[in-house]
Image (cartoon, rainbow, N blue to C red):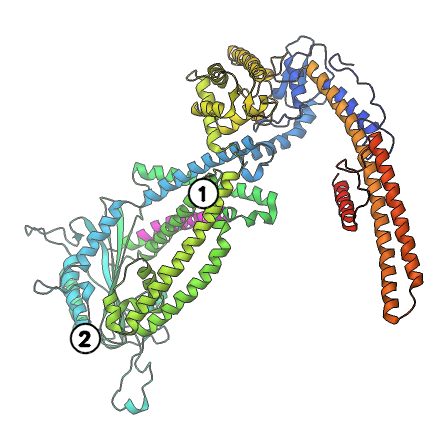
Amino acid sequence: MSSRVRPQPPPPPPPAGGGRFTPAAGPRVQETEQLEMRRIRAPASASSAASRQAWSRENPGYEPGDEELDWAGISPGRQSVSSSGTGGSEPRGEASPVPEDQPQQQVRAALPHSLLQKARALWGTRLTVDHAVSRERYLKSMLREMVTYSIFLVILCVLTYGMVSSNMYYYTKVMASLFLDTPFSKNENTNFKSVSDMDDFWKFAEGPLLDGLYWDIWYNNETLAENRSFIYYENLLLGVPRIRQLKVKNESCKIHEDLKDEIKECYDVYSVANEDTSSFGLMDKTAWVYTSEEDLKETSYWGLIATYSGAGYYLDLARNREETATKLKVLKENLWLDRGTRVVFITFSVYNANINLFCVIRLVVEFPATGGALSSWQFQTVKLIRYVSSFDYFLAACELAFCIFVFYYIIEEILEIYIHKLYYFKSVWNCLDVAIIVLSLIAICINIYRTSIVNELMRESLENQNSYPNLESLAYWQIQFNNMAAVVVFFVWIKIFKFISINKTMTQLSSTMSRCAKDIIGFAIMFFIVFLAYAQLAYLVFGTQVDDFNTFHTCIFTQFRIILGDFDFAKIEEADRILGPVYFVTFVFFIFFILLNMFLAIINDTYSEVKSDMAQQKNEMELTDLIKKGCSKAMVKLRLRKTTVDDITESLRQAGGKLNFDELRQDLKGKGHSDAEIEAIFAKYDQDGDQELTEHERQQMRDDLEKERDDLDLDRSSLPRSASGRSFPRSMDDSEEEDEEDSGHSSRRRGSSSSGVSYEEFQVLVRRVDRMEHSIGSIVSKIDAVIVKLEAMERAKLKRRDVLGRLLDGVTEDERLGRDNDIHREQMERLVREELERWESDETVSQLSQHLGTPLGINGRSRSSRPSSSQSTDGLEAGGLGGSHV
């Protein structure tokens, strides 16, 4: 038998009467006591660190930290060595040492378990940590997750910003200004943007196009290198340009019978089915012979009027100005463009070695079936040659780190899905995590594919300087990669709300939106019904005259612009002088003044509710409090600020008489302590709960503070300490802090420098628990008796109610049939007489019980001598409810 714990005498048997709870009795309790005795049995050197640590693990408030793994006394590095010579070596969580003939087998068996624990520690998130166990552990896990995510966000931002630079914008602007804004001649202001017919197209091709493509003479008339064209003397023209057109067949549309004599030819709008594939004109070269999309290796293009295929009639121009002008002249003289032409493409690529950028240019002129011409353009500035400068190699390292992070988050999400199953997908943030991972994998695949094919395509395109370099596919994949990266970055930034939502202020947005989601959905249905009705009206009334309403989807965007104040009322009024103003006024009134204000009212009301609810919530430890606590402890260790013990001691010294909670809170709050910490300190010593500390309570706090200061001084003097000398804290929050000083609000147990429970305190607690169990046993037995009595009374009441109901039904039936009801009347009198006698007997029993001090009800009140039927029923029902509750 250990000298620390004495066996307790067996508790007396419970009082007679058969209770439902038997305290401290039976074999189960004896087995528990024996188990506890075996756990606390130790050698004579009970004051050693190992025994104190083992005792602390049995403490109900003990909780291991994040880095403490349950090794079950197997790993030698996790054993606690006693300071005593006879204490020996014991595992930290065991009462008896491990046999010497089993360590190797146990180590091998524990290895998979240890690896699993380390994996959980590495991929631990808020979804893998129980919030109810420890608020501080939950916040630490979230803080670690947020720091990891912040590193991932920084790497992703460096990658995306490294792909795009201001040089790309200026490069695009220079090229666009050269080919789009240059007038056809000095005497007219027409440029490529204002091309209106085929004649304007040939003027552009023979003027600004040739001038912009071939820069073979310096401003001092000095000739540049032969067969080399440097646009603006800096941008190399790669290969030769290409001009391509698509045509539609004659008689591709139907002519009315009455007009067939007048109209002989008909060319429909462009479609793949109407595309003309027959040869025409000179019929000798590619400019006059149709070439399929597979042979050209071109891609389709989404124009202003239609989507055009990559096939057609094409001509590769030359590397010098004179030869190109000759080719264009041949095309013009032989009527290369005719009524069947629907679109012309001019494509070429340039490269600037100064900034290592390519610019793939496509100039498009569409000839609709209505006549005239519409011009459009596309400038794709991309970086196809990578890993040239030192910054490029730095971006390559960031790309590798990004792939590692994606792999890390894939494993993390798999673990969370494995733990939570389908419940995982009920959270919007979890779905966002999956979306980020999927989009990141797609971006990685696109980048790998583009990097693998860029060298081959570049080599093929640049081997023959007199051929057209088809870089559109490379530019296309680069643009897709940039778009995918942009979406990923957007979602990654949005996900930050997941981490800051732990703060009460930050949760107001998410709580407001989630609470008013149903109202907003209902409002949105009503809003879009009215909105689409106005869009349909505007399309039908103004679609043929106003450019902003020429298509239905354009009407929708135009109406959103009207809501934001961007509109042209003059054009609307000019299109229809009656319906125009009516449409505008009613749209602004119903949409802007009514529906939008209803939308704002829904959000404002919900926000007020959320703010009031959050004001009533209990203050919990927040992430900022955890960070402040860590910074405060670091500053205390560096002796840059006072400890919590010193702050509280100073507050007690400054206060006179009683110390109010508000005064202490204001003082400690100004010194950087959190509300949760202050409330914990005050609640520990405010024993009477009057929000004030009396002189006795303040003296107790002073004694504990002095003891705490001595422990802190002892810990500082013993640093650095070995792993075997670590003491484990008692409370759940403090269990997270291994080898750290407490912040001051959880004082040490007296009689021991460690945080374990002393033997004297343990004995006092054991006696208190025994007395509590005996008292509860007697109370429970009395409550059981009351419950039995109430159940019997309830059954009797129901039986009497049933009998009286049948008698009343019989009397009613006799009166209805006109029969003699004397027999039923006698039975009623007899039952009433029995009921009165029963009430008198109940009153006598109640008076006797009151005289003996035995309560008859849950509330300790006796029944009245003559209760009414309703009062009696209510009383019995209340008693029944109370009994069932107990």
**What's under tag 2, amino acid-wise?**
Asn
Q: State the image coordinates of residue 431 (x, y, percent, origin top left).
A: 51, 49
Q: Secondary structure at mark 2?
A: loop
Residue 4 location, quadrant:
top right
Residue under numbered circle 2: 334
Front label number (2 vs 1): 1
Q: Secondary structure at mark 1?
A: helix
Residue under numbered circle 1: 497
The stretch in magenta equals: 432-458
Q: Nearer the viewer, residue 410 or 352?
A: 410
Horizontal arrangement in the rendering, residue 651 relative to residue 34 (left or right) = left
Q: Nearer the viewer, residue 664 or 405?
A: 664
Horizontal arrangement in the rendering, residue 587 relative to residue 115 (left or right) = left
Instruction: Label the magenta part by its dominant secondary structure.
Output: helix
Q: Nearer the viewer, residue 817 or 431?
A: 817
Instruction: Name the quadrant of the C terminus.
Output: top right
- Label 2 crowd (10 A; few <14 / some 14-19 / many >=20): few
Instruction: Name the quadrant of the N terminus.
Output: top right
- Label 1 crowd (10 A; few <14 / some 14-19 / many >=20): some
**What's under tag 1, amino acid-wise?**
Phe
Which residue appears at 7% of the width and 64% of the height? 187
Horizontal arrangement in the rendering, residue 314 relative to residue 67 (left or right) = left
Q: State the image coordinates of residue 12 (x, y, percent, origin top left).
A: 84, 23
Is residue 858 a member of the stretch shown in magenta? Answer: no
N-terminal-most mark, 2 or 1? 2
Q: Which mark is residue 713?
A: none
User: Is 885 rendered above or below residue 464?
Assistant: above
